[in-house]
């Protein structure tokens, strides 16, 4: 999709979605989005197993100063989904004047765990290396996603180069460790082992690990709970306590571990919420919690 077509698409979608007070609040953005934002689609950020990993960059081409950026990682249990189906998730951040990077990664049918994790780390490094071209502030990167995308957001932001999952895109000489300013985790998996055996077994997790001989070790290696440490970036987790796809206990355990390690974090619970598709009111309240959390970190709308 060309830059112009995608910009128009975003504007039309937002115009269709808003009404009443929301429409009044969003009217300026609707009118200006096609003029303000350019899109560079289908950028190949890495090639693994003969598979091209791609991302889209949506950025304010006339920004005079670097702006914050959201890196969005789609869900689908590591077995399905694509960035095209996730583009709407970037709209709340675009409305704030941010840039957005919409990321695809290898599915289980292409590579088993931890392939998707390695890809998302490479995407993060690509963003940092190319930040200047797209007017992105590399010190104000927020990683987010839903479900498996929430898991991959956590892994992308919590990992360090020394953890050994950056070998597909090693740092250039003198290159600093990529910095993530915050993670917004929407009901992401935090303990992969919990989902491949026992009462919480889920088919999507079993498929991601497949018949790997060391699947329990790879599950631990691919679990955010393995990497909880004081150096983690601030994390907000949003999770429904009636989720039957990713157990709510994953959010609780992560929150407890992060708090014990002294990491700035928040658990926002959607009462009676399932696996996404929250009621509109619940979804808006959840986003309000996100904006408040990010605001405290000086990650608000661009002035």
Image: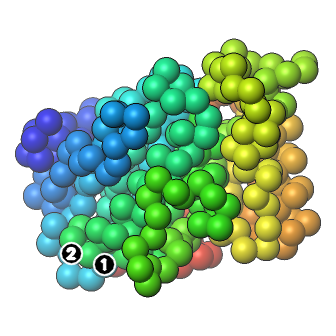
Residue 82 position in % (x across, y down)? 39, 30
The vertical placement of 169 against 84, above or below, is below
Q: Is residue 287 visible?
A: no
The quarter of the displayed image where residue 209 is located = top right
Q: CA distance from mark 2 to mark 1?
A: 7 Å
* Secondary element at image label 1: loop
Give the side of residue 37 with respect to residue 179, left or right: left
**Picture quarter with the C terminus:** bottom left
Q: Residue at x 72, y 39 (%)?
A: 218
Q: What mark, if any, has residue 127 been given in the picture?
A: none
Q: Residue at x 24, y 48 (%)?
A: 43
Q: Is residue 188 visible?
A: yes
The quarter of the displayed image where residue 223 is located = top right
Residue 189 position in % (x across, y down)? 71, 38
The residue that mark 2 highlights is 63
Residue 155 position in % (x across, y down)? 63, 52
Return the residue nearer the eye: 232 or 302. Answer: 232
Circle 1 residues within 10 Å: few <14, some 14–19, many ≥20: many
Q: What mark, if any, has residue 66 been given in the picture?
A: 1
**Picture quarter with the N terminus:** top left
Q: How is the image coloured?
A: rainbow
Q: Are marks 2 and 1 in contact (CB under 8 Å)?
A: yes
The vertical placement of 79 against 257, above or below, is above
Q: Residue at x 54, y 68 (%)?
A: 180
Give the side of residue 172 with respect to residue 258, left or right: left
The residue positioned farthest toward the top in the image shown:
203
Give the side of residue 215 with respect to residue 291, left or right: right
The vertical placement of 252 against 194, above or below, is below
Circle 2 residues within 10 Å: few <14, some 14–19, many ≥20: some
The residue positioned farthest toward the front in the image shown:
213
* Secondary element at image label 2: loop
Return the residue nearer the eye: 148 or 303. Answer: 148
């Amino acid at each position: 999709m060309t830059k112009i077509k995608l910009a128009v698409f975003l504007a039309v979608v937002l115009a269709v979605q808003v009404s009443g007070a929301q429409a009044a609040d969003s009217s300026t953005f609707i009118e200006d989005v096609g003029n303000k934002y350019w899109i560079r689609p289908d950028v190949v950020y890495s090639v693994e197993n003969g598979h091209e990993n791609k991302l889209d960059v949506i950025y304010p081409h006339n920004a005079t100063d670097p702006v914050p950026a959201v890196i969005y990682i789609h869900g689908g249990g590591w077995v399905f989904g694509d960035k095209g189906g996730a583009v709407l998730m970037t709209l709340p951040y675009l409305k704030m004047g941010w840039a957005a990077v919409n990321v695809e990664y290898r599915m289980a049918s292409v590579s088993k765990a931890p392939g998707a994790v390695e890809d998302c780390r490479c995407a993060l490094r690509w963003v940092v290396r190319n930040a200047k071209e797209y007017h992105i502030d590399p010190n104000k990167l927020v990683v987010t996603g839903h479900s498996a995308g929430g898991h991959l957001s956590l892994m992308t932001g919590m990992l360090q180069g020394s953890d050994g999952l950056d070998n597909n895109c090693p740092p250039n000489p003198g290159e600093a460790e990529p910095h993530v300013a915050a993670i917004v985790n929407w009901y992401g998996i935090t303990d992969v082992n919990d989902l491949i055996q026992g009462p919480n077994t889920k088919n999507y997790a079993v498929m991601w690990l497949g018949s790997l001989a060391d699947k329990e070790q790879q599950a631990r290696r691919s679990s955010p709970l393995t990497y909880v440490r004081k150096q983690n970036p601030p994390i907000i987790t949003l999770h429904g306590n009636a989720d039957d796809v990713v157990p709510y206990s994953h959010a609780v355990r992560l929150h407890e571990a992060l708090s014990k390690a002294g990491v700035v974090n928040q658990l926002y619970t959607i009462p009676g919420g399932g696996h996404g598709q929250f009621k509109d009111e619940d979804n808006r309240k959840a986003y309000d919690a996100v904006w408040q959390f990010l605001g405290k970190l000086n990650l608000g709308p661009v002035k």
